[in-house]
Image (cartoon, rainbow, N blue to C red):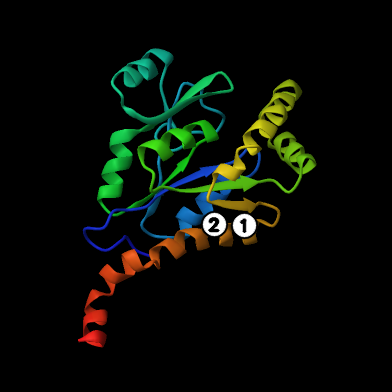
């Protein structure tokens, strides 16, 4: 699957989920198999976790740098999550969309609300776990957090999931291959819309209708 026809804007996708629902792995499976779509790398004041790399997982900045970007209106959206700040570069996203590239934002419901106001044409997807027990087990199996932090994440997950009805699409990540196929289908269907196909198939349509 390639970029959109020349002159057509890319589509902005927002993918949200409670921590542990498998959002990052699902999104990576899509970007690894589909052309013309990429993940926007957020800025964060959170310290890197083991195995995370600058410019790959996040742009890691300190609070002073983050506040400076915030004062310059450099963020399309920003939020405070678990005591750390996260933000999406406005210039990066808009430039990639102008180039006809689809962009995925992995952000929470707070950021999603901000982006909807700024770019109402975005497409939103919420990833749900199959159960609270499954979510708790996934958080524990990651081995990244203490029991106290895990309990806090589980409490916050209920609040996050209460916003799922604000989204265009809901996917339950119970069976990973099926969930990945569902997410890929959402991206694919937007490239089959009349709006985009009428441009990419212009020559064929003129030959059929002429």
Task: From the viewer's perspective, tell me whether residue 140 is left or right of residue 20.
Answer: right
Q: Position of residue 117 (x, y in %)?
A: 40, 37
- Res. 118 visible in picture: yes
Q: Position of residue 73 (x, y in %)?
A: 31, 24
* Residue 151 occupies quadrant: top right
In the image, what residue occupies the spot 42% across and 16% down?
Answer: 62
Circle 1 sits in a helix, a strand or a loop, which is it? helix
Q: Could you classify mark 1 by the number of other residues whose Cα lies within 10 Å: few (under 14), some (14-19), or many (20 or more)?
A: some
Q: Position of residue 14 (x, y in %)?
A: 47, 44
The answer to whether residue 6 is above or below residue 167 is below
Circle 2 sits in a helix, a strand or a loop, which is it? helix
Give me the C-alpha separation between circle 1 and circle 2.
Answer: 6 Å
* Quadrant including the C terminus: bottom left
Q: Residue furthest right?
A: 133
The answer to whether residue 113 is above or below residue 97 is above
The answer to whether residue 35 is above or below residue 103 is below
Please name the residue that numbered disc 2 is placed on.
183
Please name the residue that numbered disc 1 is placed on.
179
Task: From the viewer's perspective, tell me whether residue 21 is left or right of residue 194.
Answer: right
Dots 1, 2 in contact, CB < 8 A:
yes
């Amino acid at each position: 699957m390639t970029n959109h026809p020349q002159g057509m804007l890319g589509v902005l996708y927002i993918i949200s989920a409670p921590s542990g629902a498998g959002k990052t792995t699902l999104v990576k499976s899509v970007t690894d198999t589909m052309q013309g779509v990429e993940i926007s790398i957020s800025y964060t004041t959170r310290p890197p976790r083991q195995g995370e790399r600058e410019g790959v997982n996040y742009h890691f900045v300190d609070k002073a740098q983050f506040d400076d970007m915030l004062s310059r209106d450099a963020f399309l959206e920003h939020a405070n999550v678990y005591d750390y700040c996260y933000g999406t570069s406005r210039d990066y996203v808009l430039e990639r969309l102008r180039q006809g590239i689809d962009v995925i934002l992995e952000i929470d419901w707070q950021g999603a609300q901000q982006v909807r106001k700024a770019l109402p044409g975005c497409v939103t997807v919420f990833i749900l776990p199959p159960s609270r027990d499954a979510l708790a087990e996934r958080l524990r199996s990651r081995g990244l957090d203490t029991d106290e932090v895990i309990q806090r994440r589980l409490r916050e997950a209920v609040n996050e999931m209460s916003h799922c009805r604000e989204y265009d699409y809901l996917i339950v990540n119970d069976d990973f291959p099926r969930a990945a196929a569902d997410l890929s289908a959402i991206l694919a269907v937007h490239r089959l819309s009349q709006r985009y196909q009428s441009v990419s198939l212009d020559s064929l349509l003129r030959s059929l209708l002429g």
